[in-house]
Image: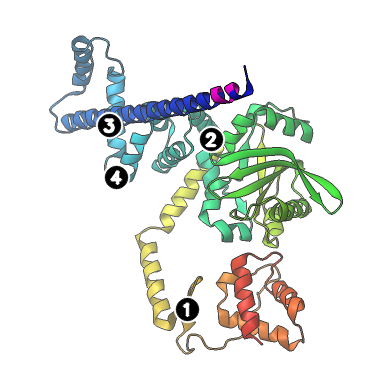
Amino acid sequence: MTKAAGAVIAAVEASFAEVVGLIEQARLRAHQAVNTELVGLYWQIGEYISGKLAAADWGEGVVDSLAQHLARTVPGLRGFSAPNLWRMRQFFETYRGNTKLSALVRDLPWTHNLVILGQSKRAEEREFYLHMAAQERWSSRELERQFRLGAFERAVLDPPKLSAALREMHGGTATGAFKDAYAVEFLSLPADHSEADLHRGLLSQLRAFLIELGRDFCYVGSEFPLQVGGRDFALDLLFFHRGLNCLVAIELKVERFEPEHLGKLNFYLEALDRDVRKAHENPAIGVLLCASKDSEVVEYALSRTLSPALVAQYQTQLPDKAVAGDQVARVLRAECARTSDAGSDNFTKAKQKIAEVTEASEEDGVGTFYWPKHIEPGSAVSYRSPPEDNVFRGVEEICMQELVSLAQQIRRQGLNGEDAWISMARELGLQRLRAASRGRIEAALAAGV
């Protein structure tokens, strides 16, 4: 066969692959349409049975008779046994009146709905698993695994610990994209495992690890090479997050988190941003995945870093879900008490009081600042230094007039150019500037001349 003939055959086969892709997409859409119709049918049957029982038109024994009647009149019909008919009634009565969730349940297979109905103990838990199963496209097997892991309990009790830069950059999206702890029980690691064991295990079970990370994570490489100056470095794992549009660097530690670990991670993030990141991508995010961590130490360490980073823990064994469930119940009860009618009234009164004594002023690209009524909005004001050494406001939380005041203080010290930048960043507790923050500081320094 000549090279030209081979090229023609390859081109034809490539076009065949496109046809196969169209068939697979049509199959997927057909499957989804059938599932939506089937779950909709179960909803209607559950609604019908619920109405008949509520109106006392039927006794409970009639449901058994209905199942027998269906089995006789529609031979080969499956899924309409008496227990399933009762589940359809439970399904309808659980979600009726909740427009948002009643629409969401139709996006999930019936098996998923049964798992969630059977294993959730409270409404908040059902809503969590409905959203996550639809968002992450979990299989029924993975959904049951997440129940065993206590994913809901972990999300309530231990939200991810994010740096201020990461929260500022991505807001609540970052909280939903990361976890405080990642379960890797599927690796079956020994108690005395090494970092190489962990690294090798994650690569051998990469599909399972990607499911645990989340569906928007895409694998890029292992021991990813970075060259800075004349030295070579290797990043443990590199991923890309489609939703956040950025690289995600993961460094593994088979020991307790120590603050100095962040220094190396920050170095890797800087190298990625300078030499690897593409122009349309957001700055890289770093994840330190440690065997254990002290939450207070993590909080202190993250409070001073300007890198978009977080510290998470990997778990080689399933957590005690019963204990976590009790803790969640206490948290939810406290939250309900806090947001009771009396709490809502207090919140409304507080807003009214603020409106009485302040005047709102919008600042483009930042938000609303509230000024005491005895001060004209936009007037010159002094910069308010942080009350404690490790408590800083974000640049976007400081009105431009305060930033200008700080810039003037720095100018009076005889500092200009790069020295003024460094001094102002130090005063604001910054180690690394985002574009938005840099723009505000640049404007303040220019106005403070």
Q: Gap between marks 3 and 1, in whole Å?
A: 50 Å
**Residue type, mark 2 in image:** Ala
Q: What range of the chain is rendered magenta?
A: 5-9
Circle 3 is placed at which residue position? Answer: 40
Contact flag, marks 2 and 3 (Cβ < 8 Å): no
Helix, strand, or loop for circle 3? helix
**Residue type, mark 1 in image:** Tyr
Of badges 2 and 3, the one in the foreground is: 3
Q: Position of residue 14 (x, y in %)?
A: 52, 27
**Residue type, mark 3 in image:** Gly
Of callouts 2 and 3, which one flags the residue occurring earlier in the amino acid sequence? Answer: 3
**Identity of the residue drawn at 51% across and 85% down:** 378
Circle 2 is placed at which residue position? Answer: 322
Q: Is residue 3 left or right of residue 261?
A: left
Residue 354 magenta: no
Circle 4 is placed at which residue position? Answer: 99
Q: Is residue 259 left or right of residue 6?
A: right
Prevailing secondary structure of the magenta residues? helix
Q: Can residue 409 be seen in the rendering of this structure?
A: yes
Q: Gap between marks 1 and 4, in whole Å?
A: 37 Å
**Identity of the residue drawn at 29% across and 45% down:** 99
Picture quadrant of residue 55: top left
Q: How many marks?
A: 4
Helix, strand, or loop for circle 2? helix
User: Of residues 145 and 60, which is closer to you in this image?
Assistant: 145
**Identity of the residue drawn at 78% across and 33% down:** 196
